[in-house]
Image (tube, helix red, strand yellow):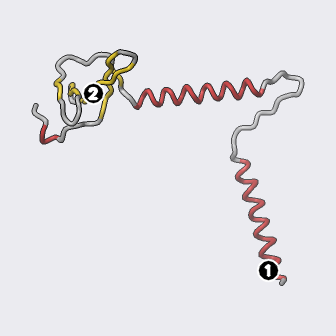
Amino acid sequence: MNICRRKIVSTLALLFVAGFAHAAAAGQVVVRKSSEPFDAFAVRDQVLLEHEWKEALRMQQQIQILQALPLACTPYSRPYIYYRCNGLFYRPYQYKNKELYIQVDDVMPASELVE
């Protein structure tokens, strides 16, 4: 009975210490005087806007969109309509009655490409 109680106490102590170690690495803590004006909702909104901006930039970096194709592009029709321009492939896309071109992965196997 005494050994079981020791195991329980040591396990609880270990969990308690691990909880504090994790909380210490949780993030930055800012301490302000109560006399200083502070709007927590404005800070939250600012952080949210920064996050949305970073996500928009990340998505923009992942997708290459052109309004016009470069010169000397070769059109292809299989497996769908696309263009090969300087070793990159673009697929037409209709957006607000305009034709845009989105970069896609290589469509043709290297054995079918004719230089």
Give the residue drawn at x 73%, y 23%. 42
Q: Of marks 1 and 2, which one's residue comes earlier in the chain?
A: 1
The answer to which image quadrant residue 15 occupies is bottom right
**65, 34: nearer the viewer:** 65
| Three-letter residue code for mark 1 | Cys
Residue at x 18%, y 41% (from the top left corner)? 109
Q: Is 64 located above or below residue 6 in the figure?
A: above
Say left or right for 57 vs 112: right
The percent position of residue 36, horizontal first and vertical second, equals: 85, 22
- Return the mark for residue 90: 2
Q: Is residue 85 left or right of residue 98?
A: left
- Is residue 26 found left or right of 83 in the rendered image? right
Helix, strand or loop at label 1? It is helix
In terms of image quadrants, where is residue 50?
A: top right
* Of the pair 25 and 97, the residue shown nearer to us: 97
> Tag 2: residue type?
Tyr
Find disc 1 in the rendering and name its residue: 4
The quadrant in which the C terminus is found is top left
Q: Residue furthest left?
A: 114
Q: Tell me where residue 47 appears, x and y as whole percent.
A: 65, 28
Q: Position of residue 81 (x, y in %)?
A: 22, 29
x%, y% of residue 60? 44, 26
Outermost residue toward the right in this view: 35
Identify the disc placed on residue 66.
none
Disc 2 crowd, CA 10 A, few/some/many (<14, 14-19, 20+)? many
CA distance for labels 1 and 2? 68 Å
**Which element carries disc 2, helix, strand or loop?**
strand
Give residue 97's quadrant in the image.
top left
Q: Residue at x 24, y 18 (%)?
A: 70
Residue at x 80% of width, y 82% of height: 3
